[in-house]
Image: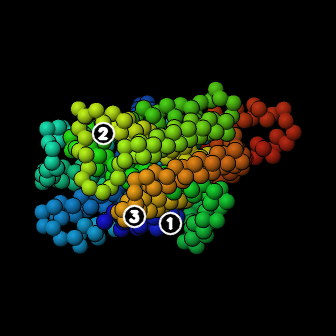
Amino acid sequence: MGLILYGVYTLVGWCGGSILNYLGPKYTAYVRTHGSMPACLPASIKLLVRLILLPRAIGGVAYPFYVGSLWYYDRIGHEAFPLFAGALLGVGAALFWTTSGFIQFAYAEEKDKAKFITIQWVLSATGSTVGAIIAFCANYKSQEAIGVSSGVYIAFICLQCFAIGMALLLLISPRNVIRDDGRHIAIFKEPTLIEEVRGTLSVMTDPKIIILLPAMFVGEMCLALVSSINARYFNLRTRALSNLLFQVVMIPAPLALAWVMDNQRLSSRRTRGLIGVAIVGTITIGVTAGLLGWILRNGVERSGNGPAVDWADSRFAAAFILYLLFGVVYACFQITVQWTLASLTNEPSLCARYAGAFKGTVSLGMCVSFIVDSQGMSYRNQAIMQLVLYAFGISCLAYVIAVYVKETNYLDESLVVVPEAVERALKAKLEAEPGVETIEETFVQAGSK
């Protein structure tokens, strides 16, 4: 089922940006922004509403359908329904998360790119933490897995259906999105199908994206390896505890990274990006090398029965700490890749295509990682593969940031409406420089659409 889900996810993800641009976010997954919310709401509340209520139209419908298929399989045992639902979820998740990435990339001002990306990560991790708390409480005194009650399935389906209803009530076109300064985010033109096909092909052949493919590919691959080790090495209640804290660490770690990536006190955006890559790269390589060393030292293999280590066991600490650190790697590595993509453009249609390319490539990496794990590749070889891919991906990230990330893209994107504060700052900086008349022409559209 996982192979089908991620295989479909990969194909639809790469096309997701063009689907979003052509159909509009109302039919994929989108949320009404604070431009149509009560004016009395603080900007921070509007931002939270915008990011929490990431809705489910076409993309979202797949989620309750998938949960229903698991409920059916749990009670009836037939595989056809959940396999079909897995394929449908691959389509829905690709559309949903492409739109999520589009909001992160296109709605944020350049100074807030990391903040927008991180808010979504933190909210997602918070929701996962709540689910993990429930699982931990249910398994605290259990040594063996127990079935899921019908009430749990029904609760998830009801919550997801409620989110779909809220989304349909709150959806608007991105052309109606208004920033806090009263300006729109861009000038939108109606795309044609041919234009979107060409746009997708242009992203596939874009040197920047091609160079970033290894970093995108490896983004989520660690999840298959560490989840497999967690399930094999620990007993049930310890697995539940480690999974809970794995989700918890994905809240403070991204916040700390966002502070670095958006810190205006550092000299330039390129410098901030390279510092972020250096920090994340050091942690990633160190943790992955540590996992490889732990596997070799303790002879952790797939053969035979697992040791079922409990948290009271002396063997617990090292594996547990490594698992938690992979929570930091899992979140922060992907945030760094997303920040790099978001820093390459502010143009909404291109942001959508970049978001789709990211999710499609990430899901391909997940698909491959689940395949190699299901085929019985040793933990040692999987860790070596991860280490090599991470090293290559980090190098690619550093190169793209050093070569392609500019201090601002506003001067080069005629369809993007420049934020008022940015316009004032740029005008003040450029007034004394030659060619100011031509530069000011890029601001004509600001606030006039």
- Please tell me whether mark 1 or mark 2 is closer to you in this view: 2
Along the horizontal axis of the image, is 438 left or right of 169?
Answer: right
Which type of secondary structure does the marked residue at label 3 adopt?
helix
Q: Quadrant of residue 5?
A: bottom left
Q: CA distance from mark 1 to mark 3?
A: 23 Å
Give the percent coordinates (x, y) of residue 207: 67, 59
Of mark 2 and mark 3, the one earlier in the sequence is 2
Labelled disc at residue 15: 1
Q: Can residue 6 be seen?
A: no
Give the percent coordinates (x, y) of residue 438: 81, 46
Q: Which residue is mark 2?
A: 242
Of mark 1 and mark 3, the one earlier in the sequence is 1
Q: CA distance from mark 1 to mark 2?
A: 36 Å
User: Image height check: is 375 above or below 38?
Assistant: below
- Please tell me whether mark 1 or mark 3 is closer to you in this view: 3
Colour mode?
rainbow
Q: CA distance from mark 2 to mark 3?
A: 24 Å
Of mark 1 and mark 2, the one earlier in the sequence is 1
Residue pictured at 13% horizontal, 67% vertical? 76
Say which amino acid is labelled 2.
Ser
Residue pictured at 47% horizontal, 36% vertical? 254
Q: Which residue is mark 3?
A: 371
User: Image height check: is 439 above or below 389?
Assistant: above
Say which amino acid is labelled 1.
Cys
Q: Quadrant of the N terminus?
A: bottom left
